[in-house]
Image: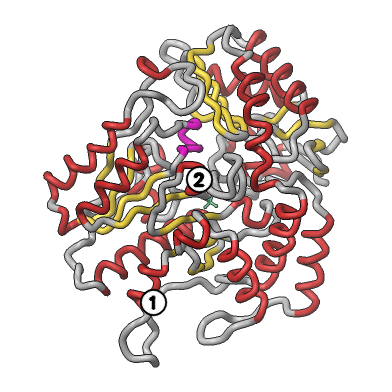
Amino acid sequence: MPNANAQTLDAYWMPFTANRQFKADPRLLASARGMYYADPDGRQVLDGTAGLWCVNAGHGRVEIAEAASRQLLELDYAPSFQMGHPVAFQFADALAAIAPGGPEAGLDRVFFANSGSEAVDSALKIALAYQRAVGQGTRTRLIGRERGYHGVGFGGISVGGLVNNRRAFPTLNGADHLRHTHDLERNAFSRGLPEHGAELADDLERLVALHGAETIAAVIVEPVAGSAGVLLPPEGYLERLRAICDRHGILLIFDEVITGFGRLGTPFAVDYFGVVPDLVTTAKGITNGAIPLGAVFASRRVHDALMTGPEAAIEFFHGYTYSGHPVACAAGLATLDIYRREGLLTRAARTAEAWSQAIHGLRSSPHVIDIRTIGLMAGVELAPRPGEPGKRAYEVFTDCFRNGLLVRVTGDIVALSPPLIAEAAYIDELVDKLGAALARVA
Ligand code: PLP
């Protein structure tokens, strides 16, 4: 492990990081097991964020390491353009068997990418290609939602709704946004789904009236917005969005990069809400974070619409060198085995109540203006310091880290999403440490 001095930290241009601030006072994670990271000195840090919403089965899973290692020696790489290899087919089958919404939903055609961003861009392209294939080629507009996060590709930032990710870059022509659903005035400290706001789905009717349905290919939303600070959909909102999409021939895409693979206590958010979209994007938990991989679940209707034309013609001009990478797929298969054996895709349903109870216990901590939980995720929103947005939460984050807890902050919201293996004692430790940090930070 290199020394954490400025000299050795220069070359690495870190992503989504205040590089100069970080390098002046680095926070390094050197190893991990179960629920804990350790820093280079061996100090334990409780993982309150499953890495970055991805290490759902906890760290250091030997089965995944062994499967990846075996695969590297068996077949390290094989191209997937006009060629195939068994592991990608096996993994696609295994994913199809647990596809969002079960067999009736028909979301069991799988396109591989290498990250959430790539899964999103792939799904947006599939939507555009579908509309063209069914004779709806004027539908080129993509709709996202304010405060949505769909990764950092040009497609993803175009439908994304976080201003800092957009302001410096050009975005796709015609992309537009639904209003976000966050409403502290009406919904603060809700238990369960927020009661108010289903009518915000009608904002899609506004965009239809403004642009014409015949220009709109697809709408993409996170069923539960993660990166914008754990924003739950109001009761009835997703159902209403689905109905409006149906009415106007618009495809609905759920971005389940965070909610996929058990975070809500069901395998996917589709299962939790009982609302079936046309495409679902996933990544992160698909390999327990161990190897980069993304996947789009497409409905048979969408997939089959593209399987037309001359058989010798490539149906969809899109793909990545590493789409269906054998090592990633082997890691994915081992991950699904663990999820199945340990019941992790539904475990959060059993821990959700105790989790919610514990996190809501922070309600009277200083500066807390809202708490939201669902499954095994939570957002604790703090009042911003006047004139210094985000500063208070950032200090909570650094205080927590110094005291052995990793949390994530976005603006003035502390986001929590521990590995799904979390037992009660870990949840107590997490809440104690976060509560102490909140009490310390001015
Ligand atoms: N979509 C959602 C909902 C996400 O939360 C993320 C990452 O946090 C992404 C897409 C992008 O994923 P990646 O960072 O793997 O590109």
Which residue is at the front of the view, 124 or 57?
Answer: 57
Amino acid type of the residue that numbered disc 2 sits on in the rendered structure: Ala
Name the residue rendered at 51%, 67% in the picture. 110
Name the residue rendered at 63%, 26% in the picture. 353
Q: Estimate how packed mark 1 is, as few (under 14), some (14 to 19) or many (20 or more) residues with alpha carbons within 10 Å.
A: few
- In this view, the mark in front (2 or 1): 2
Q: Is the magenta stretch mostly helix, strand or loop?
A: loop
**Is 288 covered by the magenta stretch?**
no
Indicate the quadrant where residue 140 lies.
bottom left
Q: Quadrant of the C terminus?
A: top right
**Is 226 covered by the magenta stretch?**
yes
* Residue 170 visible in image: yes
Which residue is at the front of the view, 53 or 249?
Answer: 249
Name the residue rendered at 85%, 31% in the picture. 43
Q: Name the residue under label 2.
A: 269
* Residue 21 visible in image: no
Image coords of residue 230 (percent x, y): 50, 32
In the image, is 323 to the left or to the right of 308? right
Amino acid type of the residue that numbered disc 1 sits on in the rendered structure: Phe
Indicate the quadrant where residue 22 lies.
top right
Q: Point out which mark residue 317 bears.
A: 1
Q: What element carries label 1?
A: loop
The magenta span reads 224-230
As measured in the structure, the alpha-carbon distance from the residue carrying label 2 to the one carrying label 1 is: 29 Å
Image coords of residue 298 (percent x, y): 44, 64
- In this rendering, the answer to whether 220 lies above or below 199 is below
In the image, is 11 to the left or to the right of 133? right
